Image: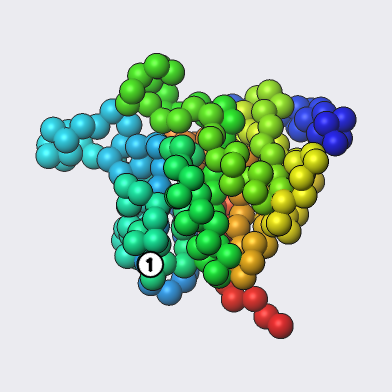
Amino acid sequence: MRAGLALVAASLAAAACAPAASEQPEQGAAVAAILPDMPRQKVVLMSSLPLVYGAGVDMAGVIAGQAEPHPLHEALAAAHDLRLPDALDAAALKGVRLVILVQPRAFAPAELVALDDHVRSGGRLLLFADPQLDWPHGIGLADPRGPLRSSLISPLLAHWGLELQNPGIESVRLGKSGVLLVHPGQFGVLQGKSGDGLCRIDSAAAVARCRVGQGRAVIVADADLLDPEILANPAQSGPANRRFVRDLLRELTQEESG
C-alpha cells in the first residue's frame, strides 16, 4: 500500500502547479458560489481556524468593524441556521443533518462517539483534515492564536478504516475540478484493520467518500484549499476551489435515488 501511495505522490508531484498569483483571471468570471442551493437548515461548523472574524482580529477589532469572516462562514450564516458549538455533543447535533469540520481541534473520546453516532444515524459530514496546514500566514507554530497545524482526527478515520499520511507534496491541481491543494495529505486503507466504514478513495488519494451506517462522509486531505487568499484570487484557483467545496456539499446533501 505504501508503495502505491509513493507512486501517487510521484505523479502528483509531477503535476505540481505554479503559484496562484501567476494565474490569469477567467474572462468575465463572477465570484463563484461556495455553497450549493439547498433548503435552509441547521448546520454545525467547527474549526481551529479563524473562520468567524478573520485572522488576527480580536474583539476590539470586531467592535471597530474590522472583522473579515471567512467566505464559507459568511455564506452559511446568511443562508442557514449556523451553529458554532464549543463542544460536539448530542445537544450540539440535535436537529442537525450537515456537519462541516475544517481542521478541527482535537476531540475528546465522547465527542468522537457523538460524531460517529450522528453519521451512522443518517447525518452528513464534510471534513477537511490537513497534515501540514499553512494558513493563516504570519502566525508561528507556537503562537496560541494559531490553528491546529496537523490534523488530530486520526481516531475517527481509523474507526472507519482510513489513515491520513503526509507525503510531503508541495501543491497540486486535481483533475477536471482544477482545485488547488497546498501540502495535501493522502488517504490510505489502514493496515491490519478494515474498520466498519465503506470508504472509496479517489485516484489522487486526496478525497475519501465513506458510507457509515445510514449516513455519509466526504473527507478531504487538505484545508489550505480554503485559504481566503486563494479563494479571493480571481484566477483559476479562486473559482475552482469555491466550486470544489460547493460540489462536495451538493453531493453530500442531495437525496440519493433508488
Vertical comparison of 145 with 74: above or below: above
Furthest-front residue in view? 110
Above or below for 151 versus 175: above
> Can you say which quadrant of the picture contains the N terminus?
top right
Q: Residue at x 32, y 47 (%)?
A: 86
Residue 204 visible in image: no
The picture places residue 228, in percent across and down from the top left corner, at 43, 38
Q: Position of residue 104 (x, y in %)?
A: 45, 41
Would residue 94 appear left or right of 112 to someone viewing this image? left
- In the picture shown, does residue 118 fall above or below 229? below
Report whether residue 146 is seen.
yes
Relative to the observer, which residue lies in front, 128 or 2? Answer: 2
Give the crowd class for mark 1: few <14, some 14-19, many >=20 residues within 10 Å: few
Task: Determine which quarter of the picture holds residue 190.
Answer: top right
Indicate the colouring scheme: rainbow
Residue on which disc 1 sits = 94
Residue closest to the eye, 142 or 177: 142
The image quadrant of residue 172 is: top right
Q: Residue at x 67, y 62 (%)?
A: 211
Q: Which kind of residue does numbered mark 1 sit on?
A: Lys
Number of numbered callouts drawn: 1
- Look at 58% across and 52% down and name the residue there: 244
Quarter of the image containing the C terminus?
bottom right
Q: Residue at x 48, y 45 (%)?
A: 109
Q: Secondary structure at mark 1?
A: loop
Q: Position of residue 25 (x, y in %)?
A: 54, 41
Q: Residue furthest bottom?
A: 258
Q: Is residue 246 above or below residue 162?
A: below
Q: Position of residue 148 (x, y in %)?
A: 45, 30
Looking at this view, is 25 or 59 the one in front?
Answer: 59
